[in-house]
Image (spheres, helix red, strand yellow):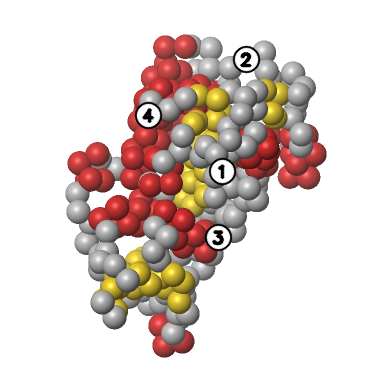
Amino acid sequence: MKRHEARRKVTMSQEHPSHPFRRDSRGNRLENWRVTNHAGGHRLWLRGTREMADQVTRVAPEYRRVLVPRSVAAHWTHALRSPRAPRDEVARLMKLLSEVITLPFMPSVAGAIALDWYKQPLDEVDPYSWPNTEVGELVHRGKYRFQFHPRLRGRFGLEITSRMCLVIENHPGLRGADVVVNVPGHDSSQVSFGSQLAATVARDTQKPFVKLKTKDPFRLAAKSAHVEQRAKTIRGQFSVPLSLDGQNALIVDDVVHSGESIREAARATLAAGANLVYGLCAVRTRRS
C-alpha cells in the first residue's frame, strides 16, 4: 500500500458480488462496499463482518444500521444509513478494511486489525510448509531469524512500523488514540520484538508510550501453549503503572495467535481508566 495511493480519493461504487459471504472465524477482509443515494443522504453497503460495521459506526456516529433487504441479502451483509453526504474519510477507511485483516470481536477491544496473515496457504501443502506472506517474512526475520542482530532486527521492525503508521493514518479510530500500549513478551528480562514495534509506533505517531508491567517475570510463550493454556497463563499478568482516565489507547503487538494477550492488555488498560481500546498487530496466524 503506497502512501500516495492511500491518500487519493476513493471511488464509492463497486460491482455486486455473485456468491454469499463466508465469514472466517480467524479474521476477514472487507470483500466489497458501495454507496447509494437515499432520502437526502446515503446508504453504505458492506460485504464483511459485524466488526467492520462496528468500526464505521464508532468513528462516524452519524451512521445508523438498517435491515438489509432480502432481495440483496446474498450480496451485502450490512447496510448503514447516513443523513449526510459521503465523507472521504469513510471511503479511506473502507479501502483500508479491504486490505487489512479485521479480527473477530474481543471483549474490551473496540476493534482489532492485523496487517496481514502470517502464512500464505497452498493447496495440498502441509501448513507447516506454507510460505510466509510479505509482512509475515518481515516478522519472522525481525522476531526470530535476526533476533540477536540489533541492526537487522531494527531494519525489519522499521519496515513493519512504517506500514502500521500508514494504517493508523487512514483509520480514524486508531489515529485518535491518545497513547500507545505494548504487550509484554513472555520473558520480562528481554525487550520483545512486539514491544519494540509499539515503542517505535508511539515515537513515529508522536503519542505517549505506555509500557505495561508484568506480574511474573517469565511465562509460557503463546506459540508453545494450547488455546486453553494461553488464557490461563496470561490472566491477571498485566497492569498499567499510571492513570489513563478518559484516554483512548492503541495496543500494538507483532503476532496475534488466540488474541488472549491483546484481551489481557485491554483489560489492564481499561482498569487504568481508559475509554476505548483498539488493537493493531503485524500478522495473524492461520491456526489459533
Marks 1 and 4, how far apart in space?
Answer: 20 Å
Residue assigned mark 2 = 190
Residue 232 makes an appearance in the image: yes
Report the side of 244 relative to 84 (left or right): right
Q: Are marks 2 and 1 in contact (CB under 8 Å)?
A: no
The residue type indicated by label 1 comes to Asn
What residue is pinned by disc 4?
A: 205
Residue 288 placed where, x, y %? Answer: 65, 47
Q: Earlier in the sequence, mark 2 or mark 3?
A: 3
Residue at the spot 58% in from the left edge and 47% down from the top edge = 109
What residue is disc 1 on?
275
Q: Quadrant of residue 202?
A: top left
Report the amino acid beneath label 2.
Answer: Gln
Q: Nearer the viewer, residue 271 or 33?
A: 271
In terms of depth relative to the viewer, which is nearer, 160 or 267? 267
Between 152 and 132, the one lying in front of the other is 152
Instruction: Single out the mark in the foreground, 2 or 1.
Output: 1
User: In the rendered image of this protein, does residue 44 appear above or below residue 90?
Assistant: below
- State how far apart marks 2 and 1 are (Cα): 30 Å
* Image depth: mark 1 or mark 4 in front: 1
Mark closer to the chain start, 1 or 4: 4
Disc sitting over residue 24 in the figure: 3
Q: Secondary structure at mark 4?
A: helix
**Residue at screen point 38% across, 47% down:** 172
Residue 168, position as x, y percentages in the image: 38, 40
Q: Mark 2 or mark 1: which comes first in sequence?
A: 2
